[in-house]
Image (cartoon, helix red, strand yellow):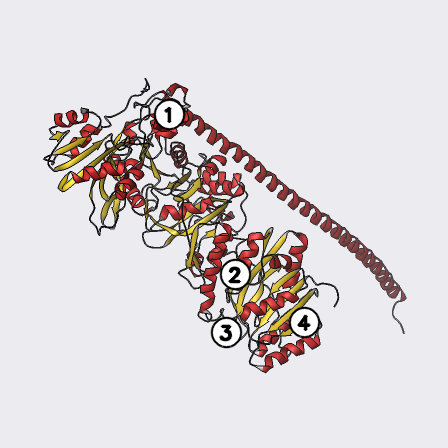
Amino acid sequence: MTSSPTFSILTPVYDPPPELLSAAIVSVLAQTVDDWELICVDDCSPNPEVRDVLRAAADQDPRIRVVERGENGHIVAASNDALALARGEFVVLLDHDDLLVPDALEHVLRVVSSEPEVDYVYSDEDKIDAEGRRYDEFRKPPYSPETLRGHMYACHLSVLRTRTVHEVGGFVPGFEGSQDHDLVLRVSERARRVAHIPRVLYHWRAHDGSAAGNTDAKPYAWLNGRSAVQAHLDRVGIDGTADLGPGRGTYRITRRLDPATRVSVVIPTRGVDALVRGERRCFVVEAVRSLLARGGHDNLEIVVVHDAETPVRVLDDLARVGGERLELVPYDRDFNFSEKCNLGVLSSYGDVVVLLNDDIEITSDDFVTQLVAPLSEPGVGMTGANLSLPTGAVQHAGLALDDRLDDLFRPEVRRVNSAGPFLVRSHLRGLVGSHMNVNREVSGVSAAALAIRRSTYDEVGGLSEVFPVNFGDADLSLKVSAAGYRILWITSATACHFEARSRPAVVRAGEAKELTRRWSLPHHDPFLPDQPRHPVAVDRPRPAYQ
Amino acid sequence: MTRHEDAEPHRDPGSVGTLLAALLLDARSVLVVGPDDDLVKTLVDHGCPARLEADEQVDAVVLGAVLEVSAHVEQVLRDATGRLGPDGRLLLVVPNAGHGSRRLAGLQGADPDLTEPRRAFTADSLSDLATSAGLRVEELHATMRDPLDTDVAVDAHRLPHAVVAWVRHQPGALEHAYVAVARPSTADEPPGPRPETVVTAPARTVRAHDEHDRREREDRELNHRLLTLRDHVIGLETTTATAVARAAEAQERARLAERQTRRLRRKLAELTAEVRTLRETHDASSRGLRGLVRRLRGRGPVG
C-alpha cells in the first residue's frame, strides 16, 4: 500500500481474549469502505495467542500493521506508538475487544467529505454481551461541550483529524484509562467543527474485565478523568474545579463567580400563601429567605414585582427579610408573567439577571454562584436550574422543545400534566451517562429559575409578552439559541418548585399556537436523548483467526 | 455644596450624632476625639456622658472625623485604645469614600480626596484598618444619604439621569458615613469576618424622588417599549422564516405528489393501453370463436 488511507484505526492491544480480538479485526475487515489501515500495537500481552491472532491478521491483509512492543508501557504508550505510524487523514479509536458496525467508516466518510472543516466525529454506541446481545443503546446529543466536561459521553466511535491530534500532543501520559477523554477535550478546544452521527456505529464489549461490563474495572480511569477535565478547565480559562461526580465516570464542575458581578434576581409575585408540609407559608418571602441563605453570592439585588393585591404584611415581611438588597416594583395590570419579568429586569441594575418564581425554595448551597458563573464563558447565553417537585420527583431538567407540543392543541388538554414539554421524561434518570448528574446543553430552560446576561436579555427582546402565562420561557430559549448562544442546565443548582400553588396551571391553546407559528420545532428535541431511531442492522462477525 | 434642589429624601436617613447616641446608651463615660466640639454637643443633647477630655479610662472612645485626616492613623488608634477601661469600645467614624456623591463628583472631574478627607475609607478598608491595629470590629453601622443630598460638590444638572440612577442603585452608594464599633482583640483571637453593615434607613426609602428619578422612570417605559418592539420584530422574522420553511416543505410535498401523480398517470395510461390491447385481442378471439361455432353449426349432423 503506497498512498495514504483516509482512516487509520488505532488499536492498542493488551491481553484480550483472543477470540474477541479476532472479532474486532473481522469487524474492521467487514467495513463497506476499503480506505483504511489498522494499526495494532501489542503491549506485551502475556498470552502468546494474542500475537498469533495479530500476526495472522497482518499476514492476511496488508492494510493491517502490527507492532509488538518490547516492554509493557500501558495504554497511552501503546496508543502513541500506533499514532506515530498513522498515515491516514483521520485516526479511528477502536478498543481491542469491541466491534465496528460494517458501515461505520462509510458513515464517517460521508460526513468528513461533505463537511471539510470537521475535525472530530463521534457516533452513538451500544454494548454487546458475551452472547452477542446488544443493549444499552446510548443516543447522544449534538456536540455538547458542557456535557463533555461532565462525562466522556462522546466516547465510541471517536474519529479525529490526525493533524489536530498531533497538534495537541497525542495521548498524554498520566491520563491512563481516560486518555481518550483527555484527547477529545484537547481536540475539541481546537476543532473547527465537531460532528455527531446519530447512529450506532460501535458495539462496546461488556465483560468482567471491561469498563463497559464492570464500572469498577478501572478505578484509576475515573481519577485520571477528573484530572483531564480539570486540566481542560485550566486551559480554556474556566475558573472552576472538577470533582468526582455522584455517578462513576461523572464529574461535577464547581465554578467560581467574580464577587464584583452584580446579580439582579427578579421575582414576580402576588404574595400568595398556602399550607406546605403542614405549615402556612408565604411563598415569595420564603423564596427570598432561601435565596439569601443559600445563594452564595453577596452582590445581589432582589427585585420583587408585586401585584396591587399583594398584602401589606407580605411586603413588610419581604422588607425585613430582604433588607438592603430588596427593591419593590408595583404592578397593577392584568396578569402577564412575561411583562412582570420584563418590568422587573428593566427596574434592575445587575450585569446578570436571574428570573425566579415566587414558589421556589432553593435547596443547594451556592445556588446563584453555580447558576450564574457559567455565563462568563463565551457563547453561553442562559442557564437553568435543577428543579424538583415537593414529592422529590424531577420537575425540570431542561425543556424539550419539539413538535410534541402539538399534543397541547387537543381541546381536551388544558392543564399541564406529567407528559408536558416542561417536564422531563421520568425514565431520564436511568439513561447511560447519568444525564441527571452532569451539567449539559439543553434546548431550553424554565423561567422558574434561570440566569441570563442582561445584554443577552436585551438583545433578544426579553420575555415575549405575547405569552402572558405559558411558553414565554420556551420562546426566550428559542430566541437565545437562534442568536447563537448555548443554553446550559446546571445539575448542582437545585431548588424545590411548589408549582401551580401560587397560580392555577392552565395551558392556553392560543399561546401554544403562537409558539408553533413563530418557530418550526424539530420532530424530536436533539438534547433529549429519547428519540426513536431505526435500528442499525449489524451482522455479527465470526472470529477468523483462532 | 451641593444638595440638588429637587432632591427630596423620602425618610430621615439618620445622622452620625443620633446613631452614636443610640450606640452609647449604656456607656457611663465617653471620650470624644475630633476636630471640633459639635459632636460632643449632639451627644450630650441626647443624654450621652460625652467629653472632649478625660484623665481616667473610659467606657468608650469616639474617633470622629479623625482617621480620614490623620497622618498617623496607627498611633491614633493605639492612643485611643490606651484610654479604654475594661470592656471598653472604640467607635470609629469615617465618611464613606464610595458614597454616591463622591462617585458622581469624580465623574465630573472633582477629586474630593485631595481636599477633604485626605484618607478614603470604605466599609472593607475601615474594617481592615481596625483589624491590622489589633481591634475586632463587632458592629458596623452606616448612616444613609442620597448622592445628591450631601456636602460634596456635585452639579446634578450636568449629570445624565441614567448615571445618577445607576449610582443610586450600586451597593454601598447610599452609605454616607460608617461607624465601626470595635474592641481590642485578645492575643489568640483569630480575625473574624467583617460584620454585615446595619443601615439607619433602607436604601429604597432614602433615594430621592427627583427629576433624575422621574426621567429614569420615563426611560424605563421607553426601554420597555423598545424591548417589546424588538421581540415583535424577532417574532415577525421567525414567523416569516417558519412560514417560508413550511411553504418550501409544502411545495416539496406538492412536487413529490405531482411526480407521483404523473407516474400514476403514466402507469394508468400503460394499463389502459394494456387493457385496450387485451380487449382487442379478446374481441378478435371472440370473433374467431364465433365464426368457428357458426361454421361448425352449418355443417349439420354427420353420418
Which dot, 3 or 4, sits closer to the camera?
Answer: 4
Are dots 4 and 1 in contact, CB under 8 Å?
A: no
Chain letter of disc 1 in the image:
B
Q: Are marks 4 and 2 in contact (CB under 8 Å)?
A: no
Q: How many residues crowd mark 3 within 10 Å: few (<14), some (14–19), many (20+)?
A: some
Secondary element type, mark 4: strand
Query: Residue A475's x, y, as percent?
Result: 48, 40
Distance from disc 3 to disc 1, alpha carbons, whole Å, reads: 74 Å
> The disc numbered 2 marks a residue on which chain?
A
Residue furthest top as drawn? B5
Question: What type is the residue that disc 4 sits on?
Answer: Ile
Dot 2: what SS? Answer: helix
Query: Which residue does the numbered mark 1 point to in the structure image?
Result: B105
**Residue B192: in sight, yes or no?**
yes
How crowded is the residue under tag 4: few (<14 C-alpha within 10 Å), some, or many (20+)? many
The amino acid at mark 3 is His
Label 2 and label 1: CA atoms lie apart by 55 Å
Name which residue type carries label 2: His
Depth check, front residue: A481 or B293 = A481
Q: Are marks 3 and 1 on the same chain?
A: no
* Residue picked out by circle 4: A64
* Circle 1 crowding by C-alpha within 10 Å: few under 14, some 14–19, many from 20: some
Q: Quick one: label 4 or label 2, which is nearer the N terminus?
A: 4
Residue identifier under label 3: A207
Q: Depth check: give the residue in front, A374 or A387.
A: A374
Q: Nearer the viewer, residue B182 or B242?
A: B182
- Asked which quadrant contains residue B281, the reply is bottom right
Query: Label 1 is placed on what type of residue?
Result: Ala
Provide the secondary structure element on which disc 1 rests: helix
- Give the CA distance from mark 3 to mark 4: 26 Å
